[in-house]
Image (cartoon, grey):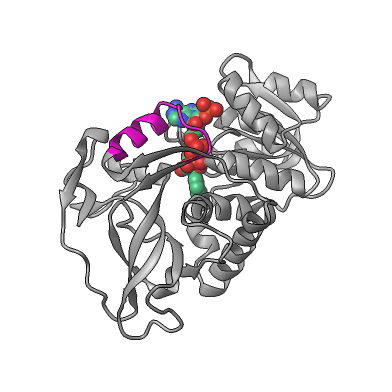
Amino acid sequence: MKAIQIQKNGGPEVMALTEVVVPEAAAGQAIVKLEAIGVNFIDVYQRSGLYPVELPYVLGVEGAGTVDQLGPGVEPFRIGDRVAWVGVSGAYAEYAAVPADKLVKLPEAVGFRDAAAAMLQGMTAHYLAVETYPIKKGDAVLVHAAAGGVGQLLVQLAKRRGARVLATVSTEQKAELARKAGADEVILYSEKDFESEVKALTDGKGVNAVYDSVGQATFLKSLECLSLRGFLVSFGQSSGKIPDFDPAILGRKGSLYLTRPSLFHYIADRESLERRASEVLDWVSKGELRLHIGDTLRLSDAPDAHRRLEARKTTGKVLLLP
Ligand code: NDP
C-alpha cells in the first residue's frame, strides 16, 4: 500500500509517498481501510521534529474508513463497520492499524469526510469550551486564528454557550469566515494591534478567556487582553514555541490563570472519548456544528497540504484522500 513516510525530520520535502506492507491486525487491533485522512498542525510538528517521533514514521493521527481486518479481542467491532479515530499514528496511508479502544463507530448520518474533519478539531473545540474554561452565558472570549480548523468550531461552540466572541484572523477572506461562524467582533491582527482593539471593544475590561493557538507571536499580548482572574488557554504554537515564562507575571497582571491543555488528556479513557466523540458527531449530523472543509487533496499531495497549512493559506479543515 501507499503511505506518506518520513525518514528524517525537516520541511515538507522529507515527506515521501512510499510503498509499505499493509499492516496485520494484532490482538486488540483493527485494520481500517481509510476513506478520508485529517491533516492537523500536530503533523507539522512531528514532521519538523518539534514533537519527537521514532523514525521512519508514517505521518497522520486522524482518519475515517471501514474496518477491513480484526485481531482477537476487538468486541464490539465487526468487519465493514464505519469508524473514525484520532491519536494513533499512520493515518497518511491506504490502511492503518488502530487499537480498537481508540475507534468510534460513526452514526449513519455522518460521512467519512465529515468524520475525519470533526474528530480532532471538533473534540478539541469541545473540551476547550466545555471543560478547560467552561464558557458561561454573558462571558466575553477571544479566539485567535478563528478561521482555522479549531478556530471556526470554537467560535461556534462559544456562541452556543452564550458568549460574546471576539476573534482574530489575518485576512479579510478569513474575517468573513469567522463572522459566518458567529464571531461578534473580528480583528485583523495582521494589520491592527489586537490588544488595544480588545481593550477598546470591552471598555478596557478585557475578556474572561483567551484561546491562543498561535503561541509565540500572540502569547504575551493575550495575557494583556484578560480581565481580572481571566484564563489564558494556550493550546498551540502555530507561529513558534513560546519563550520561557515567569509565573509571577500572572499575579502582576490580575491573578490570571494559565493552562496548556492537550486533547489527548481529555480523551484519555474510553468513557471520555465516547462521550466527547458522540456529542460532537451528533451536533455535526444535526447541522448544529458546521464543518468547513477548505482543502481536499490526494494523499500524494500531502507535502502541499503542509506547505499550505504552514503558509497560513488554509481555512477550516484540510483533508487527504487515499
Ligand atoms: P489552523 O487551521 O488554525 O491553522 C493555523 C492558523 O494559525 C493559520 O491559518 C493562521 O491563521 C494562524 N497562524 C498565525 N501565525 C501563524 C504562523 N506563523 N504560521 C502558521 N499559522 C499561523 O490549524 P489547526 O486548527 O489544525 O490547529 C490550530 C492550532 O491548535 C495549532 O497550533 C495546533 O497545534 C493546535 N491544536 C492543539 C490541540 C490541543 O489539544 N492542544 C488540538 C488541536 C490543535 P491566520 O492566518 O488567521 O493568522
The extreme top residue here reads 191
Q: Is 249 inside the magenta-drawn segment?
A: no
Front residue of 274 and 95? 95
Front residue of 261 and 10? 10
Front residue of 277 and 11? 277
Front residue of 136 and 121? 121
Residue lying at 51% horizontally and 73% vertically, measured from the top left: 270
96 sits left or right of 282 in the view: left
Residue lying at 16% horizontally and 46% vertically, measured from the top left: 7
* 256 versus 189 height, above or below: below
Residue 180: image location, x then y, percent: 68, 33
Residue 313 seen from this side:
yes
User: Where is the N terminus found, in terms of image quarters?
Assistant: bottom left
* 289 versus 232 height, above or below: below
Picture quadrant where residue 220 is located: top right
Picture quadrant where residue 285 is located: bottom right
Residue 36: image location, x then y, percent: 40, 52
Residue 65: image location, x then y, percent: 40, 62
Q: Is 314 inside the magenta-drawn segment?
A: yes
User: Which residues are the magenta region?
Assistant: 301-317
88 sits left or right of 224 in the view: left
Q: How many marks?
A: 0
Residue 245 seen from this side:
no
Residue 112: image location, x then y, percent: 47, 56
116 sits left or right of 202 in the view: left
Residue lying at 54% horizontally and 48% vertically, measured from the top left: 260
Residue lying at 59% horizontally and 60% vertically, measured from the top left: 281
